[in-house]
Amino acid sequence: MSPIGLAEVFLERLENLGPEYNAVVTITKERAMEQAERAEAEISEGNYRGPLHGIPYGAKDLLATSGGIPTTWGAAPFRNQTFDFDASVVAKLEEAGAVLASKLAMVEIAGGMGYRQPNASFTGPGKNPWNPNTWTGGSSSGSGAAVAAGLVPFAIGSETWGSILSPANNCGVTGLRPTYGRVSRFGAMALSWTLDKLGPLCLTADDCGLVLEAIAGPDPNDQTAADLEFTYDDGSKSPFKLAVLQGVLEGCGEAVKENFEDALKVLEGFATVEEIEFPDLPYEAVTRTILNAEAASAFDEFTEKGTAGELTAPECHYGPYARTAVLAKDYLKALRLRGVICRVVDEAMAPFDAVVAPSRRSPASPIDQEFRKIVPGTARDTMGAVGNGAGLPSISVPNGFTPGGCPRGSSSWGGPTRRTQ
Amino acid sequence: MIDESSKESDFLFDMVRDRYGNRLSAEELEEVRKGVEGIVKAAEALRSVKLGNGTEPFSIFKPYRKGA
């Protein structure tokens, strides 16, 4: 099929099915057709840029796009916001020949204002293509739904704490959270400068590898973008050495526990699996304090003007105020402890290829319920706190279904810059 | 008896309320209070870990000169 034909198919699906899932903010038809026509001409002339040449995709609507295309951050106060440049990820994908077909829906301000339920975007709650009465997960809700529903072959999402792995888990797709700094953040909405990461959501891990290869690399506009080449290699080196964090199933629902234990039996067919323990450190307090302090600064003007009152979710109206009470000395203590955590986690993980865990403690929750009430008990999210606080890569892959037919995921993460396989 | 944690939470909440209270309802202020208590609880967890004087913040800072 030609790039023009591909673009037409996916644009039609975005137009017809996107609204069913509240997955789309803006269909970028004009830009998509221009890029598809260019790709078709280049390929026909023998100028093939690579595996993404002529392939449509969608970008989470926190990535700046030029040409008058709105970049709304999922939030009503920014619904008419435009930029005169492309985010580096968008520019890199254009360089690879990919075709931008849509800006995809997201939780308002990437969930940074403390949402507790799915209806937290001016485009409506993200409806899960597997069951529209359940939630897509967030905050990359449209990215997960669009890939699951076949509206785009791949999408770009972002994660500060859980926002790629959650929709990957709920929507039954694969989501890759790269090592912090692997992908330039230039042109992406900043929620927390030292926690934000951009990464792909695709149908398979192989596809994620191909997309990461296109978007990774240094960028003079982002001082944290690592000067490290990334070349995707799907070659195996079995047997793998895997680890499971002690207590990781605490607080998980029974179905998630059973599903993960079944997955471990499969993994043991080609990998060794050992239990490991991390030293007793306040992992969640560190990551939470960093997030709170940086978000308070990034959205200072927004907070001072009272713009939060214009957001969709009622709980987001007051979300930014408590965090203005974070003390500077506590933020700095969190940054000092982050160094300690990076070292001890690296040491604990050194003998292993990856740590494996359920992607989330529960499958997709009902579309009309507070998801924080769905998670049973007061289970800690050590995996999320360590993975994001230490900037580690992680990938969530589909791992079966609930009895009700909702997907579940398992994730694995490795040390910084390692491939997660 | 009021413990140190409660005193700190109350002090910080009062500061937030003084600054932003006029735009929030009583119910919203109560949620903000819970948020401040969570922030103080996290801070106490951080403060409970002793670090040496030489343990620096784990962040990147490089003096900047255009083109260098």
Image (cartoon, coloured by chain):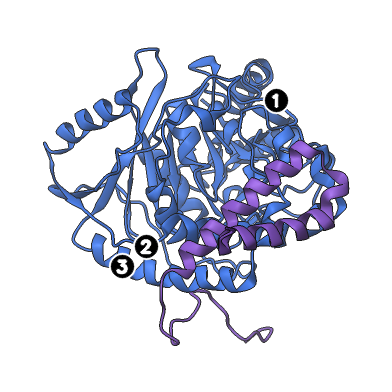
Chain colours: A blue, B purple
| Residue at the image position 56 percent from the left and 42 percent from the top | A156
Residue at disc 1, secondary structure: loop
Residue bearing the label numbered 2: A281
Which element type, helix, strand or loop, lies under badge 3? Answer: helix
Residue A405 location, quadrant: top left
Residue A409 placement (x, y as % from top left)? 36, 32
**Which kind of residue does numbered mark 1 sit on?**
Gly
Q: Which residue is drawn at 42% across and 42% down?
A: A208
Label 3 and label 1: CA atoms lie apart by 42 Å
Q: Which of A333 and A307 is in front in this view?
A: A333
Q: Which amino acid does label 3 sit on?
A: Val
Residue A16 x, y percent position in the rendering = 66, 15
Residue A124, disc: 1
On the picture, is A310 further left or further right than A10?
right
Which residue is the site of mark 3? Answer: A344
Question: Residue A228's x, y, as percent?
Answer: 43, 67
Find out whether the residues at labels 2 and 3 contact each other: C-beta distance under 8 Å: yes
Q: Nearer the viewer, mark 1 or mark 2?
A: 2
Residue A184, visible in the rendered structure? no
Q: Residues within 10 Å of mark 1 (few under 14, many from 20)?
A: some
C-alpha span from label 2 to label 3: 10 Å
> Circle 2 sits in a helix, a strand or a loop, which is it?
loop
Question: Left or right: A57 with respect to A65?
Answer: left
Task: First in sequence, mark 1 or 2: give its number.
Answer: 1
Q: Earlier in the sequence, mark 2 or mark 3?
A: 2
Output the chain of dot 1: A
**Residue at left 28%, top 30%?**
A257
Q: Are marks 3 and 1 in contact (CB under 8 Å)?
A: no
Whether residue A44 is situated above or below residue A305 in the rendered picture: above
Viewer-closest of A244 and A57: A244
Q: In this view, does A13 lie to the left or right of A75?
A: left
Question: Spatial distance from mark 1 to mark 2, Cα to Cα?
Answer: 38 Å
